[in-house]
Amino acid sequence: MLKPQPSLQSQFSSCSTLTPSFLMHKPFVIGNGNSIASLPIFSMQYSFHKKNKNFRIVTVPGNNVKAVATESSTEKATSVKTIVTVKLTAEGDTDWRDKTLLLELVSAQLDPKTESEKETIKGYANWTSQDEGEVKYESDFEVPADFGEVGAIFVENQHRKEMYLKDIIINGFPNGPVNLTCNSWVHSKYDYPDQKRVFFTNKSYLPSDTPEGLRRLREEELVTLRGNGEGERKTQDRVYDYDVYNDIGDPDSSDDLKRPVLGGKEHPYPRRCRTGRPHSDNDPLSEKISSTGTIYVPRDESFSEVRQLTFSKKTISSALPGFLSNLGNLVSDRDPEFTHFTAIDSLFVSSATPNDALSNIKYLSRKLFNGGENLPTPEIAETKGWKSWIKSAVSRIGRVISETQDDLLWFATPETMDRDKFFWLRDEEFGRQTLAGLNPYSIRLVTEWPLKSKLDPEIYGPQESAITTEMIERKIEGVYSVKEAINQKKLYILDYHDLFLPYVSKVRELKGTTLYGSRTLFFLTPEGTLRPLAIELTRPKMEEKPQWREVFTPSWDATGIWMWRLAKAHVLAHDSGYHQLVSHWLRTHCCTEPYIIATNRQLSVMHPIYRLLDPHFLCTMQINALARSALINADGIIESSFSPGKYSIELSSVAYDQQWQFNLEALPADLINRGLAVEDPTAQHGLKLTIEDYPFANDGLLLWDIIEEWVRDYVNYYYPNPRAIESDQELQEWWTEIRIVGHGDKKDESWWPVLKTPKDLIQIITTIVWVTSGHHAAVNFGQYTYAGYFPNRPTIARTNMPSEEPSDEFFTNFLRKPEGALLQCFPSKTQATKVMVVLNVLSCHFPDEKYLGEAIEPAWAENPHINAAFERFKGRLKNLEGIIDKRNADRDLKNRSGAGIVPYELLKPFSEEGVTGKGVPYSISI
């Protein structure tokens, strides 16, 4: 989208010294010829414009306003019509017909006589039509022959409220229409009377190629968007600046909600967008939480109205089943576990009927209205504000059920569960999902034996793993020795030992959860599938307790089978936490925000790289702000429902410090780093996978190559040689700011790519585009499919293993009913349903979703070379869809095909709206 500009440096550099100077009011002629009115035109000190020349605005039949420059010229002027399209919004203005827009055409050329900017041509645009959610405004202009090419338009919104400008088209020029794609909010002149907005045409320019008449505007634009780093940001501001993550906690509400600042030497982290909110009263390092719960993002980074309405509707409909499931918990002030698996199954559509739900609602209503053992005391009910709210809600919900008889009261059955109700129990599926599930980024090749920790043995115990050679060779039944298996790349690991172990003691002090460090070892079978061999769970030394660790293996006896299932539940909780905190939040959402801020601060909207990247940043800052207010915040969804608890986001800081490297965010480099691929110039993609049937990598590498080829075509057009890269000051400052400021805690790392050649830029841009599109799609849109039925991916483990300091009573109960021990270990009812709601929303594609390569950006379409490159890009993506379908139909590919197996479609480029388990949007938009 284009980022429009103010017409003066008002609130930024030396803003305190800029005072309006209302100069002579230039005469306007307004009306039908019988009446005349004078309207003032305000000029400001340090305006973008030179002294105004006289001109007339005359109303012609049809109530069209025509702007005519009065400067004498022997050459004939060109009559043009400017059409402005405004999107209607629910909260928008209602005086569409009564108010106007003041437009000013800006020439791209300087006056050849004075070598100064040419005078703008001004005119009012009036309402002409309204249809299908859009309003049209039009204005006629007489453009002198010597005016030159129109390079930009100033817009002043005469309405009382802001409006969303879609685009501006100027028709009538001999060379065809002039297009300006806006997609931006324009403030009312009454809110910011000293500022106008400027929109540039769709032509892209490197800084050195910028037309002389636009150079100052280009520079002033960046000054505006950078701000001055002072004051609290307002909703309508468009300022991009950096800050640390000091708003995760809420120390003013409770000491228990205080959280460390993320960003800096102690807790390295990427930077977020600065809001300027005052600091907390109880913690000067933390930012005060807004009383409204809203967090500033630059105005054009917010959700579209369609997305906001759909997001709200989806959230409500997703939350309803969880609300019903937990009504009993609310009135009883308890949060119990599920007592049997049929209770879990009854959450889903296929396991219950609306009449059952209505019966439950009526039963609960009787308890609420007539009293009962589950009712809270009057004091609790009054304190929590529950009773009247629940009574009202129950009454409304019961009415909805009886009237609609629909499925709103249950969660949709995830496709995995629908295809195979017992999929989550199978070890084959456990292994398969490390390659084709929700978190395909953690599996690594084992290259050394024995497995060893890098942690301090004085604190955490022996470094060498308890998984022995004998254990592994017994499990692979003598087919290979361990040494042979490693040499032939047959052993793989999920390793959450060193990352989690330092937090075990802290987490175990929290109520209702526990933690271990874990290692899970897999064997690559001749069929190309991964078979789990062993799970090692470790508790470090704690106070007077020595280190405890135990290795669990698949077993053929009843007790051993259930112990293995419990060990798997712990590992899956670790993998769920790592997926959400690192593979998903940190590596996509969090690390992308500095790219967005730097792009808007350092690259003009006219810059071709800005226009290449812009679609990949749509809505990301808004969704990140929502995450800080409800997902990753103190006592939010993540902390209350995932194993690391209150240390969740702090743990992601450790992962950033120890693991994140920009160069390894490129998919090929990531695969090589994890040992899942080796360089091979003779192989497709230049890589040979160590696991041939690795659905994420196979599809991902095809998508990576398609993206890279598109980026190469685009970059090479604008940068034919290294000199063009090195001389582009905006581009160099953009890359410097990403490294030095946005990811400043890693600014001294040697692995940062240099930016000297087109090849360097292609690699950098391809990596950013991959992260925002393919990487995010792979770890996000399968969340409900794979984790909606939470026994498959529990987010938290609440009890220790029975063999760790077992009590006679617990072990007796475990032996009598092992199912109960597993259910106690799983998330509670509230935790499970809360996460299910969130995953359902996060897995959803919205009606206004923009998929990779689906529709061309207007600025790309106007350049024949870029247009042709995009069509090739789009064609390759459509071809990828067919390749993925063919792979999913291949019965020899066991990790993506088979009885009850969900086909791997997460990297199929296109999708319908809803929870589909496929589709790759341009951006991290949810």
Image: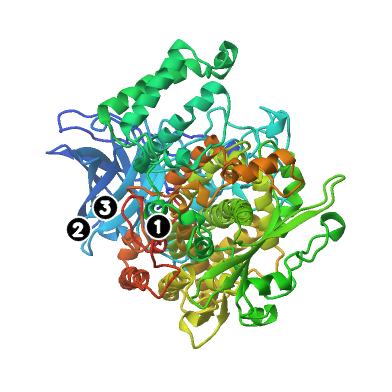
Q: How far apart are marks 2 and 1 (CA)?
A: 48 Å
Instruction: Categorize mark 1 by other alpha carbons within 10 Å: few (<14), some (14-19), many (20+).
Output: many
What secondary structure is marked by label 3? Answer: strand
- Compared across the picture, whether 555 is left or right of 877 comes to right
Q: How far apart are marks 1 and 3 (CA)?
A: 28 Å
- Closest to the camera, between mark 2 and mark 3, is 3
Quick one: which residue is furthest to the left in this view? 61
Determine whether label 2 and label 1 are within 8 Å by CB.
no
Determine whether label 2 and label 3 are within 8 Å by CB.
no
For label 2, the residue is 76
- Closest to the camera, between mark 2 and mark 1, is 1
Q: Determine which of the numbered discs, if any, sits on residue 169 in the image.
A: 3
Tell me the amino acid under the disc marked 1.
Answer: Pro
What secondary structure is marked by label 1? Answer: loop
Residue 446 visible from this viewpoint: no
Q: Is 163 in front, or is 37? A: 163
For label 1, the residue is 921
Q: How many marks?
A: 3
Image coords of residue 903 (percent x, y): 38, 63
